[in-house]
Amino acid sequence: MRAADIEGQIAEMLEAINSAEPENFSYKKAKPDNVIIRECGYDIESRSITLNFDSGYTSMNSVTEILCRAAIVKMLCQIDGVDSVSFQVGGLPLMNSSGNPTGRMTAEDFIDNTGGQNANVTVYFANEDGTKLLGSDVTVAYDGTLSMEQIILGQLLNGPIEEGLYQTIPEGTKVLGITTKDGICYVDLSEEFMKKRSGVSAEVTVYSVVNSLVELSNVNKVQFTIEGEARKTYDDLDFSGVFERNLELIDSEN
């Protein structure tokens, strides 16, 4: 860092957090661009930084949020004279999942896991006649470069590895965007999704995505767009609204 004083070093580090692009294309920025740091304060006595974020901070899903928070705290705590960092959102203390303030965080509060983590997820594929959903329990690895929502859709696009389960997503479909906010997962797919697979009902296709994503603790509902636009119908299914989990489509006999 070029600055000699702590305030200057903090400013340089925040500039890097805000604007630096990863050299490796498979990595992504620690802080999403829509998450804005509005204010930064440094207290010399407590050797602590306080960052105040705008409301965009709450748009991150749980995995992205913890990785973002860990990266920022670890980076700022590298500065000589900074021992801890506290977060605010809209001027109020950031709360953890238990409803308590996160308080001052140190680099030691976050465990390095460069090899990623494993998670068990359930994704849903079609049965043989394409009228019901069958769950497939899989273990996936994530390291923060992709969200859990992206990983789950990747599993659906790749198709099942177990016998007796069948692909639901039309061939050539691409995920153009996926974000979760306030419990709603917004999924934007390419035009190929509209070319429904033969032998698979529209409901099974749509709810293979919905039921798989709603398995995540931060997702309650799913809303679709195609190439950024809402569509009224998917084959014979109303496609314009928000979808919740459909348990009736799950084949309970298997």
Image: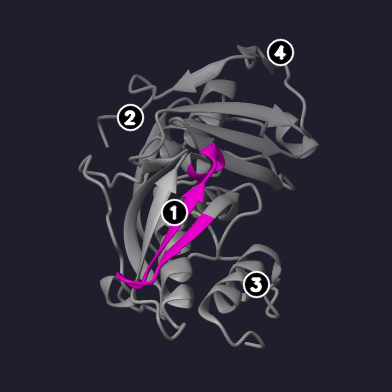
> Rounded to the nearest whole Å, what is the CA distance between mark 1 and mark 3?
18 Å
Q: How is the image coloured?
A: one colour
> Rounded to the nearest whole Å, what is the CA distance between mark 2 and mark 3?
51 Å
What's under tag 3, amino acid-wise? Answer: Ala
Sequence-first disc among 4 and 2: 4
Residue at the spot of label 4: 232
What's under tag 4, amino acid-wise? Answer: Lys
Assign a secondary structure to mark 3: helix
**Badge 4: few (under 14), some or many (20 or more) residues near its Cα, within 10 Å?**
few
Residue at (47% x, 25% y) in the render: 131
Residue at the spot of label 3: 16
**Badge 3: few (under 14), some or many (20 or more) residues near its Cα, within 10 Å?**
few
Sequence-first disc among 1 and 3: 3
Q: In the figure, 163 relative to 107: above or below?
A: above
Sequence-first disc among 2 and 3: 3
Sequence-first disc among 3 and 4: 3
> Rounded to the nearest whole Å, what is the CA distance between mark 4 and mark 2?
27 Å
Residue at the spot of label 1: 65
Q: Which label belongs to residue 251?
A: 2
Q: Which residues are magenta?
A: 40-57
What's under tag 1, amino acid-wise? Answer: Glu
Assign a secondary structure to mark 4: loop
Residue 97 % position (x, y): 26, 44
